[in-house]
Amino acid sequence: MPKATVERLPLYLQCLQAMGDVESTVSSEELANTAGVNSANVRKDLSYLGSHGVRGVGYNRLELCTQLRRALGLIEKWSVVIVGVGNLGSALAKYRGFDASGFNVVGLYDADPAKLGHPVDGHYVKSMDDLELDIKEHDVSMAILTTPAAAAQSVADLLIEAGIRSILNFAPSLLKVPDEINCRQVDLATELQILSYYQAAGRA
Amino acid sequence: MPKATVERLPLYLQCLQAMGDVESTVSSEELANTAGVNSANVRKDLSYLGSHGVRGVGYNRLELCTQLRRALGLIEKWSVVIVGVGNLGSALAKYRGFDASGFNVVGLYDADPAKLGHPVDGHYVKSMDDLELDIKEHDVSMAILTTPAAAAQSVADLLIEAGIRSILNFAPSLLKVPDEINCRQVDLATELQILSYYQAAGRA
């Protein structure tokens, strides 16, 4: 499946869920409008799921939700650890949207001894020394990395060594990871820079 | 400039800055390796800036940084407001990376009267009633939206009405904005869903 399609699947799921339970079918045009995507693209994207819709009727909404959830791996519940319990790490630990989507934060870790045992949203911050055993014992495969930039690569190496397969990296540092590891970076300053590009360009 | 190019420019800038001051030139291969982008793409992207490099030598690093900063609108300092001072809004108010990139958080706003006057990183949370006047008085054109999903659209409408041109939306809600407004959504659960897609696909 093309990368751009994969990145649009969560958007379609979000749109379908926001439509509420009243509508039993949805047309590609309707989904395209809500998602802000061209309707030919919507049909193409959904065809990768084996979903083709019925001409003049559209897609069965619940069936499409299930197909999207299955494709996105959301049928199973994922356990996630958060490493780096600063402002952002704490905020993410408290974020309700993860749990609603099938992601369960099972542990918070920090290298700062002053933070250990500190309660954050029902979890007690644990030592980095506990990380490897916890990951193995609880079969955790996803991690959210919210350490300072300087620590990010060494923590990523440690996570991968312990068995983590996917890393969502909020540290403003590009990680080098093996090909078989999934890594996404969310760089908050980058997002603002993309906006300032368009704004500066628009005013030029 | 193609959208994909625009989205890679902050990455190039980040890579060049991470190289430190020692290196005066950089080859497209070197930049490609650090950024994890194909080197032909790097050359194509940089050619949009009018930067072509010298065969066998590469690009002047400082000059390239300046060109990237100029293209990204980072020569000027942008004033930003944060609306919605929950866990994420507070964490973003304290985030040092914005300031380092040329973005200056000038005000925090929340609809909850219980939060008003509460200090967050040297700012006092202000009322939504102050928003419009503050935006006009301080010539603010960018906003970070960290309200609950249900409030996001009405707050976005208010911001645009007050003169905001760019919105970085963290609320898990798709905003409808006029064409001339720049809007980017960072949906944290979406990022994890993209990772779970690849992880589930890899295990299938």
Image (spheres, coloured by chain):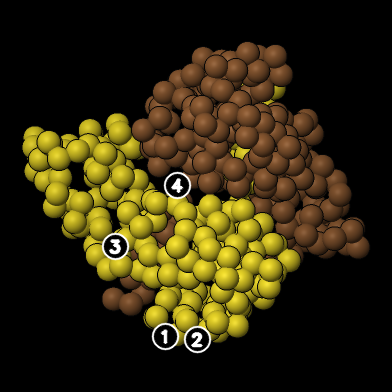
Chain colours: A yellow, B brown
Q: Is residue A201 visible?
A: no
Circles 4 and 3 in contact, beta carbons < 8 Å = no
Q: Which residue is mark 1?
A: A137
Sequence-earlier tag: 3 or 1: 3
Chain assignment, label 2: A
Which of labels 3 and 1 is toward the front?
1
In depth, the one of A86 and A204 nearer the eye is A86
Mark 2: amino acid: Leu
Q: Is residue A10 visible?
A: yes
Mark 4: amino acid: Asp
Q: Which residue is mark 4?
A: B187
Which quadrant does the N terminus of chain A fall into? Answer: bottom left
Chain assignment, label 1: A
Q: Position of residue B1 (x, y in %)?
A: 60, 37
Position of residue B63 in the picture relative to residue B14 (left or right): right
Position of residue A190 in the picture relative to residue B65 (left or right): left
Q: Position of residue A16 (x, y in %)?
A: 24, 42
Does residue A182 sit above or below A184 in this rendering? below
Estimate how packed mark 2 is, as few (under 14), some (14 to 19) or many (20 or more) residues with alpha carbons within 10 Å.
few
Which of labels 2 and 4 is toward the front?
2
- Quadrant in which residue B153 is drawn: top left
In three-dimensional space, the C-alpha distance between marks 1 and 4, rounded to whole angstroms, equals 30 Å
Mark 1: amino acid: Glu
Estimate how packed mark 1 is, as few (under 14), some (14 to 19) or many (20 or more) residues with alpha carbons within 10 Å.
few
In three-dimensional space, the C-alpha distance between marks 3 and 1, rounded to whole angstroms, equals 22 Å
Chain assignment, label 4: B
Which of labels 1 and 4 is toward the front?
1
Circles 1 and 4 in contact, beta carbons < 8 Å = no
Q: Which residue is mark 3?
A: A74
Q: Position of residue B172 (x, y in %)?
A: 40, 42
Q: Which residue is mark 2?
A: A133
Estimate how packed mark 3 is, as few (under 14), some (14 to 19) or many (20 or more) residues with alpha carbons within 10 Å.
some
